[in-house]
Structures are given as structure tokens and as C-alpha cells.
Image (spheres, grey):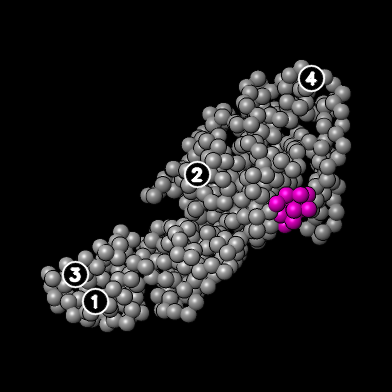
Amino acid sequence: MSQGGPYDLVVIGAGAAGLWAAIQAAHAATERADGRTSAPDTPAAGEIDPTVGSGTTRLRIAVLDRREKVAAKILMSGGTRCNLTHCEVFPADYRGGNRNRIARVLRAHPASESLRVFTEGLNVAVKQEPGGKIFPADDKATTVRDALLAAIDRAAVPLLRGRRWCGLEPIPAIPVAIPVASPAAIPNPGSPAGPRVPHWRILVRDDADRPLAPIETARVLIATGGCSFPESGSDGSGYAILRELGHTVVEPLPALTPFRLGVGFHAELSGIATPVRLELRVDGKLESAAEGPLLWTHTGVSGPAALDLSGPWARAHHERPEAEIQVLASFLPEESMESAEAGWLAGATRNPARTIRAHLSTLPHRLSEALVRAAGADPGQPLAQTPRALRRAVITNLVRFPLPVEGVLGFGKAEVTSGGIPLEEVDRGLESRILPGVHFAGEVLHVDGRLGGFNFQWAWSSGTVAARAAVARLLAAVAE
């Protein structure tokens, strides 16, 4: 068989979702050929054989990618440590898509199953850190990338590098000439007599933008990612192709990226990290919230709390530009205005000479000084001698400080994309309702998770669901 096909399934994109999907497709083909079947629409969580490449797959599967060095984003993730998943993953950890649809995908392939495949099938030792994040035990993202590529190799799935996807064309189906009684009766893919039903022609070009021989396949699984970290190869170019083919694409926006702040005192706070609770309010209504460390930078704020709120801020700003959009920071995350004021008054009663500075000694010194002075108070002023209005101005800055957000840093700093193909345009097997035979997985879909391994888990879960559905439906069609 030439590298131009024909194939039964071609995965476009050799990132996390694409490589995982190709491995799961090879497993599914082997299982069904061996008589172990799963429902075509909702793959069961426990049916993944961790022994990758344990048999000859009965389908022709390939992966193509525009880069020679694939899976670059895996290597960049988690500070080059690759935060594989989280110990607890819920639909509420994701934004963009319908929660019920997200839940169905996560149930089909939960985090526990991803860990089983990694540890038992891919021989990747893992560790859990405080807070529930899961990393490879050696803290090396290369371990994850190499394990996935080795699994692709063992499953005899060709990786077609240096091929940039530039178009997708439907082609007439070729009638199946050989009746097949059951999926197990499908001939070995090396047999020229094997039934083939090409449905799509994938148009590809090389790095010099020269056309290459198109690739024919019965089904396509698109895992081209979004727009984040474009130097890794996920530049969002696939969205334009999908729009031309009739899909809606929710406007891609940066997510998990730092905030850029306007004029203020943040520059003098660069390097300070502190726990916070951030609230996103649109026209006064609470839209989203995040808790965790906040890191002050020379351009604004970063850290998990800011990154988690950046996607919702960008989406609100894009879709409701006339609204009043605020990000309020509480540097006393466990306190309310009332409890903070009660603590102030209690401290003033116990020690009338205690200063504001001493009262706020649990906060980083430079931060507390800046917040107090921004309220118009002197940090050295005694608590008991601070007028009520000034006291409340200081407390407001402590628990409801309005960050002067001007924007978010772009896709070059974003860890994930908010936007993409809406879940309403795919079915339970993540197959397009507009382009029959085309499935989606990973970041190309309009689903983005919070920081902590949730986006990788979406890649593993959606990749599994899409791959298993594609194989089940392909074999069912051939067997008819």
C-alpha cells in the first residue's frame, strides 16, 4: 500500500489527541477482529486493552502531521513536565461545550482509564502531586511523547510526517465487492482483495507549499488542535477548511494565558505570588471564579488563578463588548467584607496601637503596602485611629480589588484555545453531523478545561470516543 492510501481511517494531527486516537483505533480494530465488541456510539470505559499492538489490526490506519518533529505541544506542557491528567475530573472543570455532552465523553473514558493505559500499556510511571495533578514520575514530557510514538510504532500505524492538511474532498464510495459475514472475516490489510470504501480525499502540501499526492480514506479523525502555541504546529488553519465545508466555528480565543493590566502599581509587585480568589463579573453578575496562586509580572498577572479566568474573560469581552467586565481579586480568599471588618475591629480592641501594616503581616509586604496606599491610607496608621470610611476602603481593596485588566496575552502565551467546533455539530461518537465519516477529538472542539491536566484528559477521552466510534461504524458498514 502506498502512503497515499487508500486507508480506512486517517487521523489528521499527531498531537496528544491524535496519537492517542490512533492507538485506540488500532486497539478497537484488534478487539473487534478478535470478537470483542463495544457499542459504536458509547465506548465503555473498561474495554481498552492496555497491551498496545498485541495483534495485527484488520484496518488500515494512518496519522499525518505537518511537522517532522511531532507532538511539540506535549513537550512544552506543564513546564516541560507534562501534567497528564488530574485525580478528579468533572464536567464542571470544562467550559464551552454543553456539560451533559462533556460528561458523556468523560464517562466513556475517565481519568482512571487514562492512567491505566499509561501505566499498564505504555509503561509510563506516574506520580500524584498535592492538589491532584498527575505527572510522569521522572518529570519528563519526553517520556510521554516517546511512549505514545512507541505505541504507534508497535501498532504498525504509519506516521506520515511533513504533510500539511490543506483540504478535504468527498469522493464517490467504491462498492464492496466481497461479502463479509462479520467484522472478524475482514481480510488482512495486506491482501489486495480486502474491501475498501473510500469516502474522503485529504489534500496535502509539503513545507514548501507544493502539492503532494492526496490521501484517500473511508473515515477521517481531525485532531489538529486550536491556535495556542502556534510554533508547535497548531496554528488554527484547520478551522478555515472546516468553515468552508459547512461547519460552524466558535471564534477561537486565547485561554489559560496571563492577564495584561493597565496603568497601576503592578509593575512594582513583579515576582510576588500570593493565594487569591478571582471573580469575573459581567454587568455586576458573577460569571466565573477561580482560586489559587496569583503571580504578579511586569506586564500584569499570571499564575493558576489568572490563567483559569483568562478564557472566560476573553469570551465575555469578545461576545459582549459593550458590557462592564470586571475582575475582582480577594487577597483574603477566606474572608468576606463583613468578616474582614470584624477582624479589623477585634484587632483594634485587643491592641489599639496595632498598625494596619502589622494587621496585614500575613500578606506579602510590598503587596499590602500597595493595596493600603491605593485606598488612601497610611500602612503605619493604628487600626483604632483609622476612620470608618478609610477602613472600609482598605478592606475593599483587600477582598474586592478591581484588577485593571486591559486584555489577555495572545495565542503565543496561551496554553489552550477557547473556541472551535461546537459539540452540537457532532454526535455521540464525535462524528460530524455535517460531514458524515469525519470525527473530531481534542482542542479542535469547543471545549477547554481549567489548569491542572484537564485539557490532556479531554484529549485522551475525546480521542478514545472518536476513534472507537469511527472503527465500530466503519466495520459495521463493511459487514453490511
Foreground disc of the pair 4, 1: 1
What is the three-letter code of the residue carrying label 4? Val
Q: Specify whether residue 9 is in view.
A: yes
Lateral position of residue 19 relative to residue 137, left or right: right
Total of numbered circles in the picture? 4
* Pointer 1 residue: 388
Query: Within 10 Å of the Cα at label 3, are there few (<14), some (14-19), or many (20+) other Cα atoms?
Result: some
Q: CA distance from mark 2 to mark 3?
A: 42 Å
What is the three-letter code of the residue carrying label 2? Pro
What is the three-letter code of the residue carrying label 1? Arg
* Pointer 3 residue: 345
* Pointer 4 residue: 180
Residue 286: image quadrant is: bottom left
Q: Secondary structure at mark 1?
A: helix
Q: CA distance from mark 1 to mark 2?
A: 44 Å
Foreground disc of the pair 4, 2: 2
Instruction: Mark 2 or mark 3: name the one nearer the start of the chain.
Output: 2
* Pointer 2 residue: 91
Instruction: Mark 1 or mark 2: name the one nearer the start of the chain.
Output: 2
Residue sitting nearer the eye, 305 or 295: 305
Instruction: Mark 1 or mark 3: name the one nearer the start of the chain.
Output: 3
